[in-house]
Image: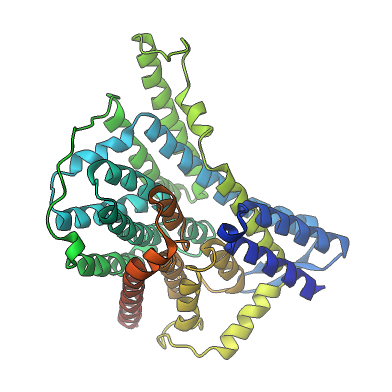
């Protein structure tokens, strides 16, 4: 039976990885795989376990284990839905047009640094996918030459993924580790910020010396300004409300989704108030009615992504509940040589984590990180978790299909897979390796200093 379950999981995994080839949205195999795995467990009355830190496997009834994993998955999903809704509310007020006011230079080299730094910072707050969409949208308005724009877009993807890796709210995988209490916000930033800076700064520096980024861009035909007078207010309120979530968790010790719901309530209340003011001043919709910004924003959030995360996280949970991931982790630890520092209590090889990072360029990083959470029973803020956060978050930049940021850039600019691999992939690999080396040096320094 175990062979059948693993076969179903692998087939589902292949379908997810090959979604662009099969032309089937990855949520379909994810949901199907999840349902079939749990159905087989229930019908065959297989013994399921809850993996407890420091205890190991503890047997439970299947419904209890299913409910436990659904609760953990729901924490992530509601957190993401809250963050997505806040971002859509900001966009409703054209808040992201505020970023365009920061762009003054016409020098390609300076613009490259400006866009990559903005991608790095923004992705840490509003997530790497949204940051990529916002910046490429602005890019399309200020750079006419498509070839130049493709290079900019490629470097934005690298910077956005690097920015998401060091923030607990910047990437789905780091959010998963944070919500699962594998990393704390402060320790994640301390250990991963510097490697992430190396990951985007090294490729940006190399690219800035290339001929494509020499000279100046052509001036704009016209200067576009936001038509919404509340755009700046909502932009800063939205960013501030998302940044408040880690603070709320630190103060209350409640799960992060609670803080995100509070932030959403505040942003939604302000949005409704400002929208009502516009309505009373005669700025009603063309249909003569008043559109709620909250309702409109909720209708625009990425429900396919939410359903995909539900499917893949619950499918991984099925294998975890059978103890398969726990046993596989033991096999890895026994057979892969450990390359870490002697002071670390974890025995997870750096090689395993690096392979996980490179693997995330080929297959989705969400199931990879979900599996690692189920496999490795090590303490909170162990260096291995920080390295996993870095590798899974940045390794996807090596291929255009390796991250959500890359996929959306591919769609917005019609970037060819082979063009990206030839021109941007090697830069992303250099940045990934530079950041990995930086992480290992920093980790060993901090561990030696602690002892």
Counting every numbered tag in the picture gives 0
The part of the image, by quadrant, that contains residue 224 is top left
246 or 334: which is nearer to us? 334
Of 32 and 244, nearer the camera is: 32
Q: Position of residue 38 (x, y in %)?
A: 77, 59
From this view, report whether residue 298 is shown above or below residue 357: above
User: Is 13 drawn above or below residue 354 in the view shown?
Assistant: above
**The residue positioned farthest toward the right in the image shown:** 44
Q: Whole-percent x and y of residue 433?
A: 35, 76
State the quadrant of the C terminus. bottom left
> Residue at coordinates 67% horizontally, 52% vertically from top-left?
28
Residue drawn at x 35%, y 15% is 278
Looking at the picture, the colour scheme in use is rainbow
Residue 169 visible in the current orientation: no
Q: Taking the image as drawn, is residue 65 in sight?
A: yes
380 sits left or right of 206 in the view: right
Quadrant of the rendered structure where residue 324 is? bottom right
Q: Is residue 64 above or below residue 379?
A: above
């Amino acid at each position: 039976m175990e062979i059948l379950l693993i076969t179903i999981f692998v087939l589902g995994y292949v379908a997810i990885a090959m979604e662009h080839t099969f032309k089937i949205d990855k949520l379909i195999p994810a949901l199907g795989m999840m349902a079939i795995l749990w159905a087989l467990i229930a019908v065959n009355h297989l013994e399921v376990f809850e993996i407890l830190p420091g205890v190991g496997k503890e047997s439970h009834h299947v419904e209890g284990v299913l409910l436990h994993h659904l609760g953990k998955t729901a924490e992530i999903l509601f957190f993401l839905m809250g963050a997505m809704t806040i971002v859509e509310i900001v966009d409703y007020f054209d808040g992201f047009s505020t970023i365009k006011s920061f762009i003054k230079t016409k020098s390609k080299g300076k613009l490259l640094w400006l866009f990559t730094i903005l991608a790095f910072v923004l992705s840490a707050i509003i997530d790497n996918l949204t940051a990529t969409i916002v910046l490429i949208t602005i890019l399309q308005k200020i750079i006419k030459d498509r070839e130049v724009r493709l290079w900019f877009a490629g470097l934005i993807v690298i910077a956005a993924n690097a920015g998401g890796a060091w923030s607990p709210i910047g990437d789905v995988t780091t959010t998963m580790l944070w919500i699962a209490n594998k990393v704390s916000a402060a320790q994640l930033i301390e250990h991963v910020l510097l490697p992430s800076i190396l990951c985007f700064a090294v490729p940006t520096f190399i690219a800035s010396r290339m001929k494509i980024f020499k000279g100046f861009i052509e001036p704009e035909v016209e200067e576009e300004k936001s038509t919404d007078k509340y755009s700046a207010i909502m932009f800063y309120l939205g960013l501030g409300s998302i940044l408040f979530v880690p603070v709320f968790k630190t103060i209350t010790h409640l799960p992060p989704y609670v803080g995100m719901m509070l932030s959403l309530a505040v942003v939604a209340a302000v949005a409704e108030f400002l929208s009502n003011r516009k309505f009373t001043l005669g700025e009603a919709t063309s249909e003569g009615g008043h559109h709620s910004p909250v309702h409109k924003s909720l209708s625009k959030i990425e429900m396919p992504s939410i359903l995909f995360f539900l499917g893949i996280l619950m499918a991984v949970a099925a294998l975890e509940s059978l103890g398969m991931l726990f046993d596989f982790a033991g096999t890895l630890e026994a057979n892969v040589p450990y390359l870490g520092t002697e002071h670390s209590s974890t025995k997870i090889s750096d090689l395993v984590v690096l392979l996980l990072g490179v693997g995330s360029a080929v297959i989705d990083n969400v199931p990879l990180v979900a599996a690692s959470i189920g496999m490795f029973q090590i303490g909170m803020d162990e260096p291995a978790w920080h390295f996993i956060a870095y590798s899974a978050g940045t390794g996807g930049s090596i291929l255009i299909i390796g991250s959500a940021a890359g996929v959306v850039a591919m769609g917005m600019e019609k970037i060819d897979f082979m063009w990206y691999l030839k021109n941007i992939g090697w830069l992303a690999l250099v940045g990934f390796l530079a950041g990995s080396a930086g992480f290992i040096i920093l980790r060993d320094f901090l561990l030696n200093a602690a002892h």
